[in-house]
Image: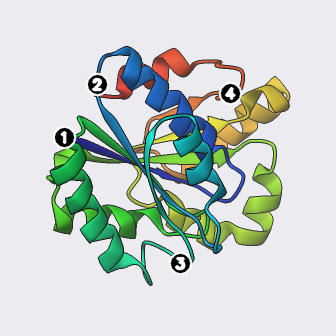
Amino acid sequence: MYVYILGGFLGSGKTSLMLNLTSMYIDRGQKVALLVNESGDVGVDGATMKREGYDAIEMPNGCICCTLASSLQEGLRSIARDLKPDVILIEPTGLALPHRVKDLVRIAMIDEEETILIGVVDAQRFDKLISKKSEFFDRQMQGCNFILINKSDTVSSEKLAEIRNWMSSEYPDKPIHSVSVKEGSNMDEVHELMK
């Protein structure tokens, strides 16, 4: 069983990516479980996913990499036991440190090779994020297996090349893909990376 953790700042497109990947796995005939972490009391993303008929578990009102760490581990064990999915997709809150979530997943149940962290970067707000939250951004990208520059359709080709060059210089060991989850651009490349 593979576990994919979608890491990135608020508004980077993690929920859209989660829904896209869920549809892909369903089309492949695989069973998917979703674990969604919201920082507020009401989990909007989880409610949307449940309404769409997906097996979604919400963990609202806290962060799964710190205050809800034990709840995350128990939730994962319950999902594995009760739902027996082929794949689990986890969307932490945009304020989480995904590499910590990855560590908690591995401790709870999953082999390191089967726990994969995807960094999601918002091309549209890239400059603002780097200028105001660069240290936090860097901590979110730590431990990523690969990085997606999302919303590539919202910036010029020159700007996209500038973002790719910056990301490649900062994270030379990580594969980087430019995508638009909303438009479906280059998502075939991403689907090929998913086991």
Q: Where is residue 163 shown, x and y percent of the image?
A: 70, 41
Q: CA distance from mark 3 to mark 4?
A: 29 Å
Q: CA distance from mark 2 to mark 3?
A: 30 Å
- Could you say whether the residue bearing mark 2 is in a helix, strand or loop? loop
Left or right position of 37 against 130: left
Residue 36, position as x, y percentages in the image:
49, 56
Which mark is drawn over residue 180?
4
Furthest residue in direction bottom, as rendered = 67
Q: Mark 1 sits on what residue?
A: 1
Instruction: Provide the secondary structure element on which disc 1 rests.
Output: loop
> Label 4, label 2: how many angstroms apart (C-alpha)?
24 Å
Type of the residue with mark 3: Gly
Circle 1 packing at 10 Å, graded few (<14), some (14-19), many (20+), is: some
The tag earlier along the polypeptide, 4 or 1, is 1
**Viewer-nearest of discs 2 and 1:** 2
Look at mark 2 in the image and give the residue it sits on: 30
Q: Is residue 40 above or below residue 189?
A: below
Query: On the image, which quarter does residue 131 sit in?
Result: bottom right
- Say few, some or many: other residues with alpha carbon within 10 Å of mark 2 (under 14 / 14 to 19 / 20 or more): few
Determine the residue positioned at 83% across, 31% down: 154
Q: Amino acid at mark 1?
A: Met
Precedes in sequence: disc 4 or disc 2: 2
What residue is shown with label 3? 62
- Which is more foreground, mark 3 or mark 4? 3
Report the front residue among 163 and 151.
151
